Image (cartoon, grey):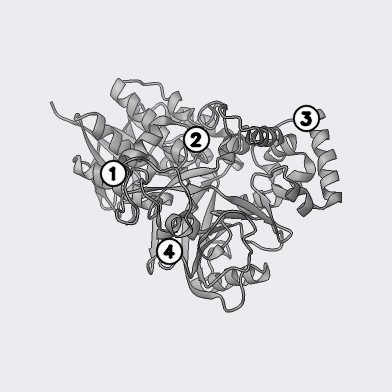
Amino acid sequence: MKKKKVVIIGAGPAGLTAGYQLLKKSGDYEVVILEESKEIGGISRTVKYKHNRMDIGGHRFFSKDPEVIKFWKEIMPIQGKPSFDDKKLKREKKLEEGGPDPEVEDRVMLVRNRVSRIYYLKKFFDYPISMKPETFKNMGLKRTFTAGCSYLKSVVVKKPEDSLENFYINRFGKKLYSMFFEKYTEKLWGRHPSEISADWGSQRVKGLSITAVLKDMFKKVFHINGGKVETSLIEEFIYPKYGPGQLWEMVASEFEKMGGVILKDKKVTQINQKDGKIKSVIAGEGEIKGDIFISSMPLKDLVNDMNDVPKKILDIATGLPYRDFVTVGLLVKKLNLKNETNIKTLGNIVPDCWIYVQEPDVKLGRIQIFNNWSPYMVKSPSTTVWLGLEYFCNENDDFWNMSDKECIDFAKDELIKMGIISENAVLDAHREKVKKAYPAYFDTYSEIDKLIEYLNKFDNLYCVGRNGQHRYNNMDHSMVTSFETVNNILNGVKDKSNIWNVNTEKEYHEEK
């Protein structure tokens, strides 16, 4: 019997997961993945620069879906021996019995501490906000009193959740919202939270609120286990030795060993449809026909590349907004930030993976400290600090169009202005640009259901992943859209609602 041909657009987590799962579960398919760039992993790739590595956007490997965890561990087992920094600092870690030694083997997941804090008023605050005495001390008596009254008011008087602003105010009160959410959200999206759909909040922070924070503290104080934990409150995650791209490169390799084909530098520019089916795509200079098509390309591009699309649907797709992204890698001698935590680190640097920058007078959104993600991401993790400075922008705006030197100088000056580094601290630098990093929740997003309904009429087309569904998914949710797709294909299920519903239901995966 002739094998059915499956064409997958995009070699990011969703596309690779779909291809790998299809070939692993069935021998009835011929699978080809088309990737527009020369790289594997999409925005989950690892960028290598002079023996230092950058994780674009930061990717914690954490999920409450056992199938996702099983997938990750199948590709890369969890460490069974201490990593370089664990050994040097004599840190105790829960190791996997019989797992690989990261000092000897590369195919290994490390167990890492999750530390993310907010930098505001030149002080550190827990992320999410905690109710520790240190928080109140940093806020000062007047701010604390105002925040408390504001929160109590939000408990009694609820606002209609018709915007992201009201979503946050209902959970934290207006004062805490204005301090810790308003400006950062505006930096991220380039829009005020009052203009953004509450859908973004319900997907990204779901059950997180003052109540959830207090419950989490209560459990820790009284050593109570069990029950659900909000994703934003987790304290540990696993992470590939050389960053997320390493795992996806391995998935790609396993996919090819099973007979799958990956064609790089093949940007899809045309999608040919007829009689309710996708017939073929044009990628590069050639036409590729298929029986089934799985797309992780941006919805906007997918619909714009199709023939005979009704004008109303085309307008919705064309109006879907995105936020683009620039990361500036800075290799520095040291940070001026003091490690006042009880967490040991190499060089006694602050232990954060991410620092959320809430200071209103800088454009900088987040700082990644790659040393803390994995010591193997940095050539000399004991004597240098490798930072990723994250800027949110729009393609072709003034910031995006800066030269490498202008952008690096701008980023360096902001860190000096904030007192995080000294004038002569920078040893080397590198810039990376990422288009369509964040699907956004405004403009024609309010009509996305009509677009989904139109696309679902093509029974051989499946939309997966973050950009494929125009949904700000975490990596595990993007993978689950592909698990659901593969199950539908193998079982002949025509209804695609299970695929589109991943990470929309409150109880789906963030809470269990």
> Reading the chain from its start, which is encountered first: label 3 or label 1?
1
Q: Position of residue 39 (x, y in %)?
A: 34, 55
User: Mark 3 packing: few (<14 Cα in 10 Å), some, or many (20+)?
Assistant: some
Check disc 1 and give the amino acid type: Ile
Which disc, if any, is residue 33?
Answer: 1
423 with respect to 325 (left or right) = right
Viewer-nearest of discs 2 and 3 = 3
The image quarter in which residue 218 lies: top right
Which mark's residue is nearer the viewer, 1 or 2? 1
Q: CA distance from mark 2 to mark 3?
A: 35 Å
Residue wearing tag 3: 158
Residue flagged by tag 4: what amino acid is it? Val
Q: Which residue is label 2 attached to?
A: 313
Q: Give the mark nearest the N terminus, 1 or 2.
A: 1
Distance from Cα at disc 4 to Cα at disc 1 = 31 Å
Residue 95 falls left or right of residue 228: left
Circle 2: residue type? Ile
Marks 3,1: beta carbons within 8 A: no
Corner quadrant of residue 202: top right
Query: Where in the figure is residue 405, as x and y percent of width and height?
Result: 51, 74
